[in-house]
Image (cartoon, rainbow, N blue to C red):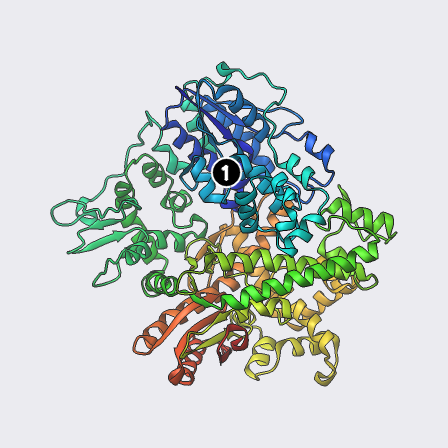
Amino acid sequence: METVYLVDGSSFLYRFYFAMKGLSYNGFPTSSIFGFAKLLLDIENLHPSYIGFFFDTKAKTFREDMLESYKKNRPKTPDDLLVQIEPSKKLIEAFGITIIELDGFEADDLIATYAEKLKENHKITIIASDKDLFQLVDKNILLYDPVKKITYDREGVFKKLGCYPEQVADYLALVGDSIDNIPGVKSIGPKTAASLLLKFGSIEGILKHIDKLPPKTKKALENEPNIELYRKLTTVDRNAPIEVDLNLLKKKEPDYNKIREIFMEFGFKSLLKALPNNPKTAPIPIDQSIIFPKDNTAYIYKNSKTSPIILGDINEEINCVYDFKKLDRLGITFKHYPFDIKLACYLINADSKGNPFDCFDLIDTNLSKTIASLNKPEEIYAVSCKPLKEIIEKRNLTYLLSDVETPLSVILNEMEKRGILIDSDHLIKLKNEFENTLAQIEEKIYAIAQEKFNINSTKELQRILFEKLKIKPIKKTKTGYSTDSESLSILSEKYEIAALLINYRTITKVITTYIVPFLEKIDNSGRIHTTFNQTLTATGRLSSSNPNLQNLPAGDDEIHAGIRKAVIAPDGYKLICSDYSQIELRVLAHMSKDPALIEIFNNNQDIHTQTAVKLFGVHPGMVDHNLRRMAKTINFGILYGMGYVSLAKTLSISKDKAKAIIETYFNRFSKVKEYIENTISFATKKGYVETLFGRRRYLLNINSKNKRMAEFEKRAAVNTTIQGTAADIIKIAMVKLHKKLKDFDAYMVLQVHDELLIEAKDSIAEEIASVVKETMESVVDFDVPLKTNTKIASNWYDAK
């Protein structure tokens, strides 16, 4: 039987957007378009005869008639995603594929209808990432996730969810679906739902034997009257009113000229080589004896999981590598650090994220075209190596590449392999406590509202707060009066229910964003191993993923403190936490040469207290917590380009007063104003800015006619020079510290922005703390001293 491919376009539209958020070309967002381009090229390799892409429409669906709050908690589709929808669809059609939509029905329903009608005489492969579609899998229907590259059959669904396809709707009804705003049954999670369905078969079976259930589960089910409604919402409609026409799915020949045109329009030069009959641009002559070893042969190290990544002979001289960190992870060692193409591209143009195509696009158009014409990675690396070396040397970036970024990639690999130790018992206890607290908060909210309602539903909240309780709203949005955190924070000063809602959301976020993902990621040794991303951010900062440890909550309150308490030292060791104190303001003082700022830091005075003194004309002894907080907001607000309107809103003061404060600030710290103006002027003329060490970020929209976009890039220009320099400083410190720790039983395990976490043997913890502090504080010679807060403890919170 011939295979028919049914693709869930809507889910990929969002998935690609968030997976590669921030990807752009000449100022136009391209993450979703690029994701579809790669997906379509992969699909083309399958040589499908029949295929269709299915999308949702903007029209209201039948599920919204069943439950008003259905999908209502979804934020408004971002503008930078909306503008990518039509280009994505044009690209799909250029590949000869039909797009199918129907008002009132979701893409899932249309896929289900087509699959149901065609499965008797055809094999069906659903290409999707949405777990709702698992319920369609049967003997003739498979689901393929192209991102994870996994094909799910009946047993595959069971392995993934713990239930079979025919139980998926029941499973989703029990556990809920936060994306679609389906609450599910409170306190029934994935494992409980799967075990109940395995034992009783369905929701009907579970309810029939409800007296046999544990008391907590029984109570939860008895208190959820909408379980059947939830199942109707999670069940795909296999009978949507649409004509199933196989001829409509007949794959046409791709229009490669149109595809090539779209790829060039959005900067997808790296994908051009995958297209047939790609017209070759005359390549720039290459001096083979620079590029290759003496016998003119390129030796390429290959691994089943990676593309070719070495130029040169492993046993002889290595000329260039792409992604040295990968090689280190593979156990390949070198006598000296090789030239890393990926890191070089990132230093030359941070927005390239290490990609030679995007790096050369702004520097050498001819070379960019030459690279776009090449088909093999080794050819691309060979052409890139020499000009990259020349640019690195010309811009005086050799130190940053050879002595900082390249050795840092080895250090990050070691940190990833070691990981951080997690107290799972503490997290589980914390999760249970938080869930109990949530239950208590819910009851208080229901008592004030005098009814039970869906707290996570914006529509329901609006009804309760502004209609039933007659609370005066703060602001209005397109969907009604706002219930966002800013509005609730203002309302909480007068209304208990608003304060309870803030607390409810905070605890829920901590559970879903940190506790649950942490528990899922812990390995057999009790550790979590994040991946440090060295070439992703525009400022030079490191980021981390799977899980993201850069955004761990730093608050001192009980809710946030519990997460850091879960990061612990192994038996016989201590954790040393060393955090740069106000590093960005110290960088600003040095780079602006502002005498008032320099004096404050050189006199070892508190910057925020002294700022309050200069702004509000009070004696230092009169600066209370509130005045210092205001001064701190102003200091960092100025640093990040906050205008008087935002400052007024943040400090809850009038716009006139905010404007006066900013004017006073710039009078007191006049060199800061001069530095900001000079930086913006430079960026406006040159189209880029650089950190103190030469790392470059291009700002292509700083002269845009779009005022909002231009203002954003002006703020980014100043922020990049300060934050980027601070990022360089801690990277230099990490490299220097790594050398000093080699002879000790001590290991860097985590870096979060301006903070380092080190595991050290008990007996040497004090000595290592001194080494860490001295290294971090002496890493650069500035006009002001660098200071760190360095502490020793058994868990991260106490060391912080």
Which residue corresponds to mark 1? Answer: 164
Give the left or right position of residue 101, taking residue 464 as reference.
left
* Residue 357: % across, % down: 38, 42
Q: Nearer the viewer, residue 113 or 40?
A: 113
Circle 1 residues within 10 Å: few <14, some 14–19, many ≥20: many
Q: Nearer the viewer, residue 340 or 699?
A: 340
Q: Which residue is rendered at x = 73% and y = 62% of the image?
A: 440
Q: Quadrant of residue 527?
A: bottom left
Q: Which residue is rendered at x = 55% and y = 27% of the image?
A: 112
Question: Taking the image as drawn, is residue 30 in sight?
Answer: no
Give the left or right position of residue 623, taking residue 635 as reference.
right
Question: Taking the image as drawn, is residue 304 in sight?
Answer: yes
Residue furthest to the right in view is 470
- When the figure is inspected, residue 733 is found, relative to residue 380, above or below; the finding is below
Q: Nearer the viewer, residue 92 or 701?
A: 92
* Residue 439: % across, % down: 70, 59
* Residue 212: % across, % down: 62, 50
* Residue 99: % across, % down: 54, 24
Query: Secondary structure under badge 1?
Result: loop
Q: In the rendered view of the protein, which quadrant contains the N terminus?
A: top left
